[in-house]
Every structure is written in structure tokens, then in C-alpha cells.
Amino acid sequence: ATPQTVDLLAHVKGQVANVMPDLGVVVSASGAWLQGIWGSGGESEGIIKLLVDSPQKPLRARSIDVSCHGTLIVGGRILDEKIFEPAIEAKVRGIIAGSASASLRPQMEALPFPIVLTEGFGTISMAEPIFSLLQDNMGREAILSANVQTRYGVKRPDIFIPLRAEEVASSETDDPAPVSY
């Protein structure tokens, strides 16, 4: 059989640290890593865009417009399904919120982009440290992985915000931790 070249999206900019024949490669990258509680919709990347100014404030449909195109929109909570249609129309790349009602789960699972809840289901505001980190990195690119595995090798949804090359060079990393995608 003739070998075939297959292009795989790494979802992160970094250095190839190891090549594993017939399996793939290990990509090394530095950045901030946040874990969520629930997610749906696979993987995406985009620019972080906060649509609220505090972790208690919910996402509102009127805040989602053409300026959200290609972004990962962030809000404290999701109160109802009214935000989903404008998010689809604006072609957002993903939603990050603290919580949402469990009754919205079917609509969230049907979205054409990933969604991550950092706190889970209910009316819980996004945790202040997570909100602050996202706020500090607004306008930066992030990778959203909403893949969830609940048994055997549990995988939680996560958000990775890569450091820029110049930040990596100046940062002192004592104990880097590997992240698998």
C-alpha cells in the first residue's frame, strides 16, 4: 500500500517535541489552561470576547452581533435559549459561560460550535478567578475543547490560552504539565 499524508489540526501553536511513528506527534506549548465542568460540540479556536463586565451577569441576545464573528464569547451565565440564534447568525466559534439551566442541554448539544460551562448546570455565576483570567486575556486567541468523557479516562472540557513566543521566552516555568487533546 502507498503511504498517504494526513493533515491533522493541532489546535495549538507550539514546538514538535516528539514524533511517534505511526501514531502522531507531541506538541509542546506554554499557556493558561482552564477546565470546565460540562461541554458539548467538539473543538474550536477563536479570539476571547467578553460580553459582560462581571461573572454574575448573563449573556444577552442583544449583545451578540456581527462583531462576535469568529470569537469565543464569554458570559457569566446563560439564562435562556434566546442567545443561541444570534450566536449562530454571528458565526461565533464557541461560548464559554459559568452555568446554564439543565433544560437547555438539548439546544446546547445541537449548536454548530462548542460550548463550555465552567461551573455546571444551574444558576451559578462563573468563578471569579476564571472570569478574571479570561478578562485579562480578552482579544487573545484561545482553544476550546468541549469534548467530554465521563467514564474510563475521564476528560473534562477545557480552554487553553497559548502564550506568545516572546512571553514563553521570558516566563520561568518550574514544572510544565502535559495536556492531551
Image (spheres, rainbow, N blue to C red):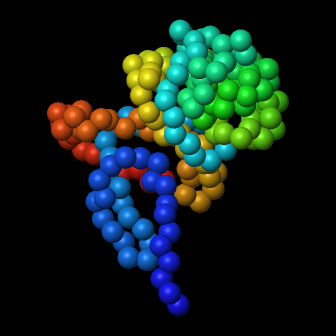
Residue 158 position (above or below residue 124): below
Percent coordinates x, y for residue 5 in the rendering: 47, 73
Residue 124 position (above or below residue 149): above
Image label count: 0
Q: For residue 120, say whether it is visible.
A: no
In this rendering, would 80 be left or right of 114?
A: right
Q: Residue at x 64, y 35 (%)?
A: 115
Q: Residue at x 67, y 44 (%)?
A: 41
In the image, 173 versus 41, the foreground residue is 41
Residue 154 position (above or below residue 66): below
Q: Residue at x 52, y 22 (%)?
A: 49
Percent coordinates x, y for residue 176 in the rendering: 28, 45
Q: For residue 26, say whether it is visible.
A: yes
In this rendering, would 67 be left or right of 87?
A: left
Percent coordinates x, y for residue 90 in the rendering: 68, 27
Image quarter of residue 101: top right
Residue 134 position (above or below residue 41): above
In this rendering, would 107 be left or right of 74?
A: right
In this rendering, would 166 be left or right of 70?
A: left
Percent coordinates x, y for residue 61 in the rendering: 73, 16
Q: Residue at x 66, y 18 (%)?
A: 65
